[in-house]
Structures are given as C-alpha cells and as structure tokens.
Amino acid sequence: MADGAELFRDDAFAGRNVLVAGGSSGINLAIGQRFAGMGATVSLVSRSRDRIEAAARSIVDAGGEAIGLVADVRDFAAVERAFQQAADRFGAIDVVISGAAGNFLAPAVALSANAFRTVIEIDLIGTFNVLRASFEHLRKPGASLISITAGQARRPLMFQAHASAAKAGINNLTETLAMEWGPAGVRVNAISPGPIGDTEGMARLAPSAAVTAALKSRIPLRDYGTKRDIADAALFLASDHARYITGAILEVDGGSILGDASADALTVPERPR
Ligand code: HXC
Ligand code: NAP
C-alpha cells in the first residue's frame, strides 16, 4: 500500500452508529475519532461529565457527529440508560467498543481486597455490563462488539494480578458471547493492544525513559504501537471484511505476546564441532 493511503473510504461507516465505553481519553477516544472520521455517529461514555463532553467536542470540532454520555460501567442501570440515550439519538447501535479500564502497578501483597475488586469491577464486570446492556439495542444481524483486553490476560505479568485476572475474564467472556450471540448475527471479538505510546496506561506501567527503552528492546517489532494502530484494527473488525470473524482475540502488539525478543534473552551456544 502506498504511504498514507487509506484502506477504507472516508464514508465507509456512514449510517453506522458506534458506542465507545471508556471513551474520554487514550486508545478508546482514538477509536471513536477514527470511526467518526469514516462517517459514523459516535456515542462516548465515561464517568466524568467534563472529560466525556470534551472528548465528544473534539469529534464535533473535527466535523464529526458525537455525544458524550455519563455512566460508570460498574453501574448496570447507568449503562442501560446510556445505551437508551444513544439509541434515542441515533437509532440502533452497529458497533460497541468496551474499553473502560483502571490499572496501576502493585504487587499482590500491596493490593487490598478492595483494590483487586475495583479493577475486576471496572474491567470485567464493566465489560459484561456494557455488552449485556448493548444487546437489546444492537442492529441484528450485523452488529460488531469489540472488547479491549491486554496481553497479560494470556501472559501473566508481575504486579498486574488484578488487571491480568480481569483481562483474562474478558477474553473468555468474548469467546462465550461469540458462541451465544453468533446465531443472532452479532460478532464478538477483542483487541489486545501491546504497549501503546502516549497513553495513560503506559504512563502508569512504564513511567521512566529507562523502563520504556528496556520494554522496547524486548518487543519483536522494537517499538511501542500507536493509538491509530488499535483504531485501524477496530475499523477492520467492525467492517464487512471481518464478517466471518467472531470470538477472535486480535493481538495488536508488535509480537509482544510471543515472549522476550531481546538480543540477550538467550545466549547462543557455540556450534558443536
Ligand atoms: C495499590 C491502589 C492503588 C495503587 C488505588 N488503589 N491505586 N492500591 N496501589 N497504586 C486502591 C485504593 O487504595 C482502594 O483500595 C482501591 O484501589 C480503589 O481505589 P479508588 O481510588 O477508591 O477507586 P476509583 O476512584 O474507582 O478509581 C479506580 C482506579 C483509578 C483504577 C484506582 O486509578 C482509575 O480511575 N483509573 C482509570 C484510569 C486508568 O487506570 N487508566 C489506565 C488504563 S490502562 P482501599 O482498600 O484503600 O479502599 C490499562 C493498561 C492495561 O488498563 C495493560 C497495559 C500493558
Ligand atoms: P485511559 O486513557 O485511562 O482510558 C481509560 C478510560 O476508561 C477512560 O476514558 C476513563 O474515563 C474510562 N473509565 C475508567 N473507569 C471507568 C468506569 N468505572 N466507568 C466508565 N469509564 C471508565 O487508558 P488507555 O491507556 O488509553 O487504555 C484504554 C484501554 O486499552 C483499556 O481497556 C486498557 O486496559 C487497554 N490497554 C491499554 C494499553 C496501553 O498501552 N495503554 C495496553 C493494553 C491494553 P473517565 O476517567 O472519564 O471515567
């Protein structure tokens, strides 16, 4: 493909309605902005009225159509209300991104029961609440649901007991709902970002230049990804080009899931004579 060329037409999602849970910043907002740039209407949902309204404004100011809705994904009734508001405004929902998350680095012995529960409630129960509340409002057949998971769901990471367990649950939920909702014509997939630059997540997990350099040296593709990389994967999964894909956990991670690819990860033995 030529540099900068677009795989999708800029009206590829015209007439489609997208809802992004956890859409006030970072990767999720970038996904919403990308869909809006392709003609979709976008309903962004998060806890903070100021942040979510600013996020929606960023889309409107760029010429797109968006609203900001307030709901804490831990509160099922609030999530139901947000879907109702989005559907009242735009009609049936075609694409749902479930990306609300909370995370911090902490060894398990430093986690209170409430700290562990908080992350499970935001990430895993929040994802159930979002996907479950979406069902009545989806365009069926044809809707595409995408959860945002993480590599530590499959490859445990120290000081991430809470987030790893929550994301592992999201992977299984994705696969189970793909089986249950496939017959209704609803596809359910997940995107598993690797380390993504310029995000709150990596600011928390790799807070110094030294840690960042060490992490990059272990990634097969030797760099962090971009928010755009994740948004592009979401466009693909939501498009008709992915019409036969459901239950997939799509790693968009430069190969990180495969393991430590640093040059000194293994000492190459002398070739025996
Ligand atoms: C230990 C901590 C802690 C920390 C909070 N807690 N931070 N424990 N180490 N650093 C504990 C608190 O003491 C409390 O337990 C419990 O967690 C709940 O904290 P609250 O502040 O009351 O919770 P709440 O206001 O709901 O905030 C949730 C939050 C917060 C997760 C703690 O950080 C948040 O809102 N985060 C959203 C933004 C975010 O995290 N973005 C990054 C997502 S990135 P006690 O027992 O004291 O009551 C991501 C990356 C994935 O997910 C993978 C990358 C590779
Ligand atoms: P972020 O900017 O902090 O995004 C998290 C979003 O979740 C915010 O919009 C936040 O909005 C919202 N949120 C948090 N708790 C919520 C709640 N209880 N109810 C509703 N909304 C809530 O972080 P990010 O780094 O871009 O991460 C986005 C997603 O990618 C997450 O699912 C994360 O696990 C995943 N991920 C990120 C990376 C990375 O490298 N950054 C890697 C792997 C996976 P409010 O504060 O306004 O509520």
Image (tube, rainbow, N blue to C red):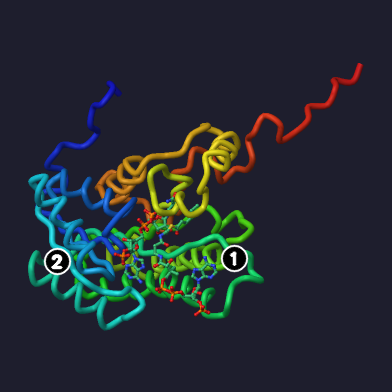
Rendered location of residue 52, percent (x, y): 21, 63
- State the residue position of label 1: 161
At 55% across and 56% down in the image, what residue appears? Answer: 152
The outermost residue toward the top is 273
Task: Name the residue that disc number 2 marks.
Answer: 92
Quadrant of residue 185 within the rendered picture: bottom left
Q: Is residue 118 left or right of residue 29?
A: right
| Residue type, mark 1 in image | Ala
The quadrant of the image that shows the N terminus is top left
Relative vertical location of residue 184 with respect to residue 25 in this rendering, above or below: below
Question: Which amino acid type is marked by label 2?
Answer: Ala
**Helix, strand or loop under label 1:** helix
Q: Residues within 10 Å of mark 2 (few under 14, many from 20)?
A: many
Q: Where residue 144 sits: x, y (%)? A: 28, 58
Quadrant for ligand 2 reads bottom left
- CB of residue at label 2: within 8 Å of ligand 2? no
Q: Quadrant of residue 92?
A: bottom left
